[in-house]
Image (spheres, rainbow, N blue to C red):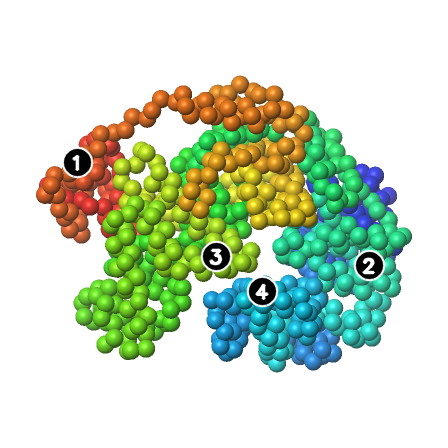
Amino acid sequence: MTDYLATLNEPQREGVLTTDGPCMLIAGAGSGKTRVLTYRIAHLIQQKGVDPFSIMALTFTNKAAKEMRERIEKVVGHDARNLWMGTFHSVFSRILRAEAHHLGYPHDFTIYDSDDSKSLIRTIVKEMGLDDTVYKVNTVYSRISAAKNRLISWEDYLRNAELMGDDAANLRPEIGKIYKTYAMRCFKSGAMDFDDLLFNTDKLFKEHLEVLNKYQHRIHYVLVDEFQDTNLCQYYIIRKLSSVKENVCVVGDDAQSIYAFRGADITNILNFERDYPDLKVIKLEQNYRSTQNIVQAANSVIKRNRAQLPKNVWTANEEGNLIELIKAVSDNEEGRLVATSIFQEKMQHQLKFSDFAILYRTNSQSRAIEEALRRMNIKYKVVGGLSFYQRKEIKDLLAYLRFTMNQQDEASFRRIINLPKRGIGDSTVDKIVVAANDHGTSIWEILQNATPFVGGRVAGPIDDFVAMIKRFTIEIQRKDAYDAAFEIAKGSGLLRELYEDKTVEGLSRYENVQELLNAIKEYVDDPERQDKTLGAFLQEVSLVTGQDEDKDKDPDKVTLMTIHMAKGLEFKYVYMVGMEEDLFPSQMMISSRAELEEERRLFYVAITRAEKRLFLSYALTRYRFGRLKNCEPSRFLDDIDQSFIKVSTKFSGLESAPPSDYAKKLVTGIKKTITSAPPAQKPTAYKAPADFVPSDTSSLKEGMKVEHPKFGFGTVLQMDMSGADRKAKINFTEIGEKTLLLSFAKLRIVEN
């Protein structure tokens, strides 16, 4: 018995030694599946003398393949480098390089990434004279990709009455023709996109049996990691390759199948035994990651699903703490309570910030969390996405708001002039900027009389843009920040463009813009704020977003990510926020049992990321689409066996409620807290004299005395000229220090 076998438990050892015939390893969360897969391959090479060139191991990420190869190499040496190991796309592109001529492609065919594909689709839509606001590139690309993943060629697509009917119902009847043109254009260019690497491999094996036969006899063992994430195309290729030897081993966990939106088909793992009647099923059920309370709570959740492979995950780890439920009055308070809890847990238990992760269902939820962490000077990193205020759609809307406030803002002008598209290209923009510089005037002045500088063709769209900005300028003078921002988001066309993009990415961008509007609404509704104008909000946001430019490489940061991004990771402390109906489960994912069960599997994944402690939080109110909405606790909280959960009393002062009726006590306690809280004392507002006129602040310096129409008199402490927006830190007599953006602040210099 080799040393590596001695480190395995009995089911793991069985998974390594059962090398011949079809085998399925059902691997519960934290059960060491990667170790089993690694040692299984090492055992084939070292103990059974299998040629590494005849072993194919398929993963879903390059990182997983690299780590697995390195582990195998430690056991068997350099022979590990001869394995057919990598992602589905990388391994099958290797086969296609050698065999593509059978399909009429050159061996050195080009591989288009998603940007290349979308660029070609955009060109085809334009050439066909179609409306690109209807045939959005992301929508068309997703539709074609989904068809290829289901092995539907363009010929089959055009013959499929259901698909064509769906397109017609969605007012996009030409998608089939776009698919045909796109496929033919790729073929003519000797190019394949990522989906083609799988689609064409299946086509190659289906249409050229001699090629399939060659690889069936060359590849003796096929191993597949994360099998629950495979789509139809991937499964068919696996079956074809392994149909002669039938030495196929798949490793996965149906309870962690959460990628249906990417084409993953859970029936591949659920029905695997049907396709292989003599299948050997081995269950890896011992969890090495989490405490007993966390493991048993996860089990109590997932058992609610009907579609599943039965297993009983258990652990010999310590019992651990109960799962702690944090409740908040609002989403902003939720962020504050989570940040406070992280800070206290870190100090109390001598932890690192990198021991903590905050998970959420949608990217838009990060806004309130990020702002709370910033206020407590807790460093964080957003994994798999940008910080909220760095996302393109957020920057786009902020640029519209800023340009409406300040028509001298060239950076914002460049960002929005052709967004959404209005036929104003980069060369036209350059002409406008050059004309402004040559005439010693502003861009705005040139825009208002653009024809002499840009010609007649684009003068019309520019005139429309100018009229729109003027209309927005009137709106911000008579409306508060939210009403003005909403009018700009709607009137500019940004909201409509995002709303009409029904892809997963498009929905996420639409939610993010809605979350920015929610933040503005919350700002306006705050009774403590005296200045509710758009300028005041932009000033505060600019000061916050300036902190996003954190370039330090300190790894000790709290991790923020969606649950989908967290799969495969683990953290000592996990905070799952936003446990509310319509948010988690998502209101868009509860129209069928299959969708609801996938949402529950997603919750199971979130729970099983935690090693030592798990915190769940929800808010009683949350701004959604600009309205303060009363929220209900997620139904998933009821799925947890109540013996594994307790209500947090750290922050609210509530007594611990019996687990069986925690939700009722929670709502009652918070309402009591709200009604009994003493009213906040508002500072006396400063009232500027009737003759108040702001000064030109271009020469403002440290030490100068100034007057502000809301904050009163103060002294300039510090000037910050580093960024695009000049800032001044001012100590006001009545309210203390404030940092103001000079492009928005109305200051009168009273003493030099």
Earlier sequence position, callout 3 versus callout 1: 3
Cα distance between the residues tagged 3 and 4: 17 Å
Q: Where is residue 592 in the image (x, y as percent from the top left)?
A: 66, 48
Q: Which amino acid does label 4 sit on?
A: Ala
User: Does the residue at mark 4 contact the one at mark 1 (Cβ under 8 Å)?
Assistant: no
Residue 605 at least partly seen: no
Quadrant location of the N terminus in the rendered image: top right
- Look at the numbered disc 4 and give the secondary structure of its residue: helix
Q: Are marks 2 and 4 in contact (CB under 8 Å)?
A: no
Q: Earlier in the sequence, mark 2 or mark 3?
A: 2
> Which labelled disc corresponds to residue 499?
3
Which residue is the site of mark 1? Answer: 687
Q: Name the residue under label 2.
A: 221
Residue type at mark 2 is Tyr
The three-letter amino acid code for the residue at tag 3 is Tyr
Q: In the orientation shown, which residue stands out farthest toward the top? A: 655
- Under tag 3, what secondary structure? helix
Mark seen at residue 169: 4
> Could you tell which of marks 2 and 1 lies nearer the N-terminus?
2
For the point 17% across and 36% down, which residue is it? 687
Q: Is residue 354 left or right of residue 316?
A: left
Q: Residues within 10 Å of mark 3 (few under 14, many from 20)?
A: some
Give me the residue at 43% from left, 36% from top: 332
User: Which of the two marks, 2 or 3, is nearer to us in this view?
Assistant: 3
In the depicted structure, whether residue 312 falls above or below residue 158? above
Of the image marks 4 and 1, the number of the one nearer the N terminus? 4
Q: Do the residues labelled 2 and 3 touch (CB within 8 Å)?
A: no
**Viewer-nearest residue: 595 or 691:** 595
Ranked by sequence position, the earlier of labels 3 and 4 is 4
| Mark 1 surroundings within 10 Å by alpha-carbon count, few (fewer than 14), some (14 through 19), many (20 or more) | few
